Image (cartoon, helix red, strand yellow):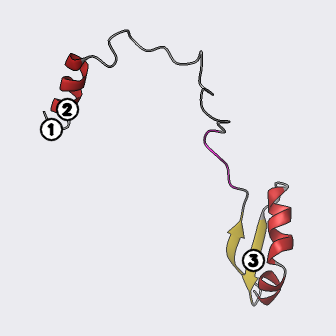
């Protein structure tokens, strides 16, 4: 545990490279540090351009009213 606190930045660097690190206390594993896996890696506005097809009436008053009713706020 003490070594992990002392060398946290090195541990994080290793994890960023894809390694999984186990931290133990008195020889007993108590934690596992793993790379964070992002669900979606979007680069910014318009990153889904050409991948989403919306109906022509997606923002019509009737559609908005139906959604509001579904949530009980109509």
The earlier-in-sequence mark between 3 and 2 is 3
Disc 1 target residue: 73
Spatial CA span between label 1 and label 3: 49 Å
The earlier-in-sequence mark between 1 and 3 is 3
Residue at the spot 59% in from the left edge and 20% down from the top edge: 49
Extent of the magenta region? 36-40
User: Of residues 31 and 7, which is closer to you in this image?
Assistant: 7
How busy is the neighbourhood of tag 3: few (under 14 within 10 Å), some, or many (20 plus)?
A: some
Spatial CA span between label 3 and label 2: 49 Å
Disc 2 target residue: 68
**Is 37 in the magenta?**
yes
Q: Do the residues labelled 2 and 1 touch (CB within 8 Å)?
A: yes
Residue 36, horizontal then vertical, whole percent: 68, 55
How busy is the neighbourhood of tag 1: few (under 14 within 10 Å), some, or many (20 plus)?
A: few
Residue 34, horizontal then vertical, whole percent: 72, 61
Residue 24, horizontal then vertical, whole percent: 74, 81
Q: Which quarter of the figure is the C terminus placed in?
A: top left
Disc 3 target residue: 23
Q: Which quarter of the figure is the N terminus placed in?
A: bottom right
Q: Do the residues labelled 1 and 3 touch (CB within 8 Å)?
A: no
Residue 47, horizontal then vertical, whole percent: 63, 28
How busy is the neighbourhood of tag 2: few (under 14 within 10 Å), some, or many (20 plus)?
A: few
Label 1 SS: loop
Q: Is residue 53 left or right of residue 72?
A: right
Q: In this view, does 71 lie to the left or right of 3?
A: left
- Quadrant in which residue 67 is drawn: top left
**Is 38 in the magenta?**
yes
Label 3 SS: strand
């Amino acid at each position: 545990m003490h070594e992990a606190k002392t060398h946290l930045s090195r541990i994080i660097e290793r994890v960023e490279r894809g390694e999984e690190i186990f931290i133990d206390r008195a020889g007993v594993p108590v934690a596992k540090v793993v790379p964070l896996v992002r669900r979606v890696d979007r680069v910014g506005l318009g990153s889904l351009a050409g991948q989403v097809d919306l109906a022509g009436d997606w923002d019509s008053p009737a559609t908005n009213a139906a959604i509001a009713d579904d949530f009980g706020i109509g």
